[in-house]
Image: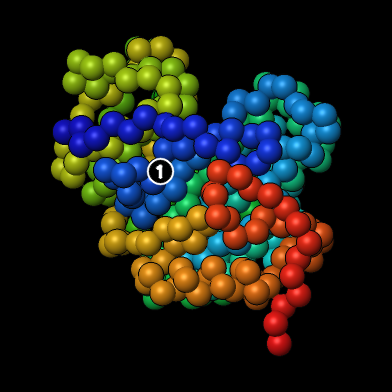
Amino acid sequence: MLDIVIDARQAAISEFIRVKRILPFRQRRMVGPFIFMDHAGPVTTAPNPVSNMDVLPHPHIGLSTVSYLLGGKVTHRDSLGVEQVIVPGEVNWMTAGSGIAHSERFEDPNVLQNGGLEMIQTWVALPEKDEESDPSFENFKPEQLPVFTDKGIWMRLIAGNAYGLNNTVKTLSPLFYLHVVLDAGTRFALPKEHSERGIYIVKGSLECNGQVYREAQLLVFTKGTDPLIIAKESCTLMLLGGEPLGDRYIWWNFVSSRKERIEQAKEDWEQGRIILPPNDNHEFIPLPDDKSKPAGGPRPEPLS
């Protein structure tokens, strides 16, 4: 049975980029361990300079960010000194744990060629025992990710397990995350391995129980149901879900099972205790009063 339909809302993540924000939603905070989901693009017109698209260095705790591109490219830099140019089809899994800062820069003037920039970013909440783990970053190439094809169906497993597929992307709780493309008229079923399951429609439209659903909608299904999904036209979908972790607090870029930990993260960022990327440390997003107005400025010196 369909539990809820979430319509994406508009949000700003940089001076130029506006995204479709899907999670969190007031009536449905999480789907499995997924607590945040943004869909950026497709962006087909670049600002001048293209750096106006940049997302400046900003902090995270208590989560893993998962960046997956459908088009374009972006340069990731983080507190660990990682510098990674992300291209379509790769999985980029950054675990913030006790605290990390990262930036997303658009440095290639040709970033919008061949269809433009389009990116899905999700946050996966961490189990309580892993919330203070050491930060880490891993990049997985498309050839490391299993692909399944059948008549009218193409799918790539981004992380977790589903439909009998597995890969080496390390996850800390049971989940699944897939990129799926369906031809018009294709019938499709959700994976049965997990109790919480969602379908986000990136492009196209689907029919479920006689009702048609369209681009920028997330369909969340109750446990134990096996709905029949029919592609009304060629569709691009993101499937995600898994097992619930329990309640989480979320404020700005921070996620935790403890409210006081969020307050500590705020102070840590203000006082410079979360290290900026060593190769991108001249500007940053300060702790917001108004979350809709990100801005940069000189970095305060860490306190001794």
Q: Give coordinates of residue 32: x percent, y percent.
A: 32, 51
Residue 86: where, in percent of width, then height?
A: 69, 44
Which corner quadrant holds the C terminus?
Answer: bottom right
Q: Is residue 200 above or below residue 241?
A: above
Q: Is residue 205 left or right of residue 202?
A: left
* Residue at the spot 37% in from the left edge and 72% down from the top edge: 258
Q: Residue furthest front?
A: 289
Say which of 246 and 285 sits in front: 285
Apparent side of residue 269 relative to residue 152 in the rendered image (left or right): right
Label 1 secondary element: strand
10 above or below 281? above
Instruction: Give the labeled residue for mark 1.
Output: 23
- Judge from the rendering whether residue 141 lies leftward or rightward of residue 22; answer left or right: right
**What percent of the width, then of the height, locates residue 179?**
47, 35
Residue at point 28%, 31% (across, down): 5
Quarter of the rendering containing residue 278: bottom right
Frontmost residue, 230 versus 11 = 11
For the point 49% across and 61% down, the residue is 254
| Number of marks present in the image shown | 1
Closer to us: 143 or 295? 295
Identify the amino acid type marked 1.
Leu
